[in-house]
Image (cartoon, grey):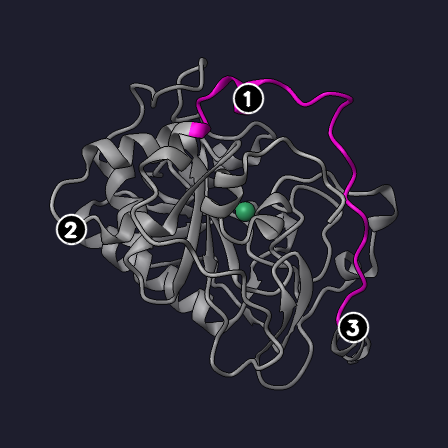
Amino acid sequence: MSITISLTPSTIKGSAGLGLALALCAPLAPALASPWGAITQPSSGAPQVIGATANGCIGGAEILPATGPGYVSVRRFRNRYYGHPNLLRFISDLGRAQQRRHDQLVMVGDLSQPRGGRMSSSHRSHQNGLDVDIWFTLAPSPAAANRLMDKTTDPPSMVRSDGLFVSERWGENQRLLIESAARHPAVDRIFVNAAIKRALCEETRGDRGWLRKVRPWRGHDAHFHVRLACPSDSPQCVMQDPLPPGDGCGADLAWWFSEEARKPSKGGAPTAPEPVMPAACQAVLRDF
Ligand SMILES: [Zn+2]
């Protein structure tokens, strides 16, 4: 990958699967107004995850219902509410866990396009039906969620403007939401702002095993990004590198608050090259 971002070797080691993680926020090349965004329906056949989250697609994707117990799917006009059944099950489980704790709803953001693939905006990943964004702000009702998310501005950040610590908006609801996501067996990893990871490291007592799945990244201060492991029904799914051992609360997290990590990169953000998609995605694209 030709992206040049200043990262220490220990951080690269600590952020296993960094290549794909970088793709979370890499800008899209203009040529990526791809055919995938124009597709309005999933392809036929059994669900099949093909390729990687930042270079792949999904056949036979399922549609996330607009609402369910404990959750509401927002910004449906983007038509990015498709995923592998494991992802829909995860969202349903997260909503039910939320419902048991609280009467407010989890706001579920983008999953994938009907057949996955490149998006014209917002994400480099979310391509193979295994990624979903979850907002930290809870909603009292589906109508309130849609009113809030109708606007172009996102819900508020949970991180102070200096980027070092969580803000007064951060609380028990947010901590339990991300813990419940990280404890789900289908979840491979979660990306979240480094200040939020730091808060989780400091607040967690007892079992800390789930903290390993929560990886620091830039942005991700108003939502967190959940990525599932490859499903057993999808042999063409490409997994990220395994996560390093430990809870990720040590030197690797500290690096995110170093001068090196916090200084703006020189010369503006680089543009990621367009990789060659897996051949099997062409059949998914052409299925009508
Ligand atoms: Zn995301």
| Element assignment for label 1 | helix
Q: Is residue 33 visible?
A: yes
Left or right: 271, with 46 as reference point: right
Q: Which residue, as the protein is rendered here, is positioned at the far left?
A: 206
Q: Residue at x 41, y 51 (%)?
A: 72
Q: Residue at x 18, y 54 (%)?
A: 100
Query: CB under 8 Å between callouts 3 and 2?
Result: no
Name the residue type under label 1: Glu
Name the residue type under label 3: Leu
Give the overall secondary structure of the magenta segment: loop
Q: Which image quadrant is residue 150 in?
A: top right
Return the residue at label 2: 207
Return the residue at label 1: 260
Q: Residue at x 63, y 86 (%)?
A: 45
User: Closer to us: mark 3 or mark 2?
Assistant: 2
Residues drawn in magenta: 255-278
Which of 288 and 250 lies nearest the eye of the viewer?
250
Tell me the crowding category of disc 3: few under 14, some 14 to 19, or many 20 or more residues within 10 angstroms, Cα based. Answer: some
Percent across and percent down for residue 214 are 37, 46
Left or right: 54, with 93 as reference point: right
Which of 213 and 42 lies nearest the eye of the viewer?
213
Query: Nearer the N terminus, badge 2 or badge 1?
Result: 2
Query: Nearer the N terminus, badge 3 or badge 1?
Result: 1
Q: Is residue 70 visible?
A: no
- Where 229 falls versus 147 (above or below)? below
Q: CA distance from mark 3 to mark 2?
A: 44 Å
Q: CA distance from mark 2 to mark 1?
A: 32 Å
Quadrant placement of the C terminus: bottom right
Return the residue at label 3: 285
Name the residue type under label 2: Asp
